[in-house]
Amino acid sequence: MTTPNRPAPEPVSLGDGQDALERLRARGRVDVDSFLSKLDVTRILHEPIGPTAQCLTLDQLEQYAFGPVIDLPHLAECDSCANALRAYRAVKERSAVPAGNPLGVPVREEMAFGVEVPEVIELGLADLQFDVVLQVDSVLDVQPADLKVANSLFTDIYCKAIDVVDSDAEAGWTYRARCVGRRQDAMVSGFEPGAKFVDWIQVSGKNTAGQTFDASDLARFSVSKDVSAVRSGV
């Protein structure tokens, strides 16, 4: 099985960033606060993060990290922006303060869980089969029916099997979830054959021990030629 050839975002939080700043203040030979005070924050927030003028800005990362991205065709072609958006969302998720936590200290999931989707998912047949790679720090004791896969382009996605790909006591376990999705014809028919775009795929669930897990990844979609049959009402 071929997995996506892209770097996985480091599992950090905003709190980790604050810790790094404190270490720099304590051990660094540079006046960190003086350096930060001279930065033009407004300019930085509005500068493209990638090599082209069409690349996302930091402000847009905040805007699209948890929002719809189908209308951003640039993401389908730019690895720099897609990877930055993945990493930004991962940081925000790990920095979230759960309800009922008055101290405001981020609480990390008991089960470390990551997900990788195929490099490209082609939207063609009504029933579409694709694999999702699951990476966990311990054995993923979960039934296929308890694995929830969601995406706005499908009316339903279900997991029919979960296979072990690799296991290592130190590196963790890698699984392959074999998924089947039925597309939303009303939405897909709005795209021309050959269109390319990206959208979030969310994977969540609970194992037999009651531990919950939740992760997401950006998927690249390509609309196949047979979508013309949907557009014409066949």
Image: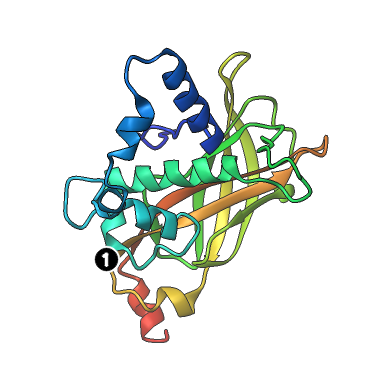
Q: Quadrant of the C terminus?
A: bottom left
Percent across and percent down for residue 185 are 48, 76
Percent across and percent down for residue 37 are 33, 39
- SS at mark 1 in the image: loop
Residue 138 vs residue 11: left or right? right
Q: Nearer the viewer, residue 19 or 229?
A: 19
Give the quadrant of residue 94.
top right
Task: Note whether 106 is above or below 147 in the view shown.
Answer: above
Percent across and percent down for residue 39 are 28, 41
Percent across and percent down for residue 214 are 63, 45
Task: Note whether 171 is above or below 215 in the view shown.
Answer: above
The residue wearing badge 1 is 194
Q: Could you tell me which residue is drawn at 49 percent across and 67 percent down? A: 153
Circle count: 1
Q: Quadrant of the N terminus?
A: top left
Residue that sits furthest to the left in the current view: 52
Q: Could you tell me which residue is drawn at 17 percent across and 55 percent down? A: 53
Q: Nearer the viewer, residue 198 or 92?
A: 92
Residue 198 vs residue 153: left or right? left
- Callout 1 amino acid: Gly
The answer to whether one can see residue 143 in this image is no
Residue that sits furthest to the bottom in the current view: 233
Q: Could you tell me which residue is drawn at 36 percent across and 86 percent down? A: 232
Q: Could you tell me which residue is drawn at 30 percent across and 31 percent down? A: 35
Residue 152 vs residue 29: left or right? right
Q: Nearer the viewer, residue 29 or 182?
A: 29
The figure's colour scheme reads rainbow
The answer to whether one can see residue 61 in this image is yes
Pointer 1 local density, CA inside 10 Å: few below 14, some 14–19, many at least 20? some
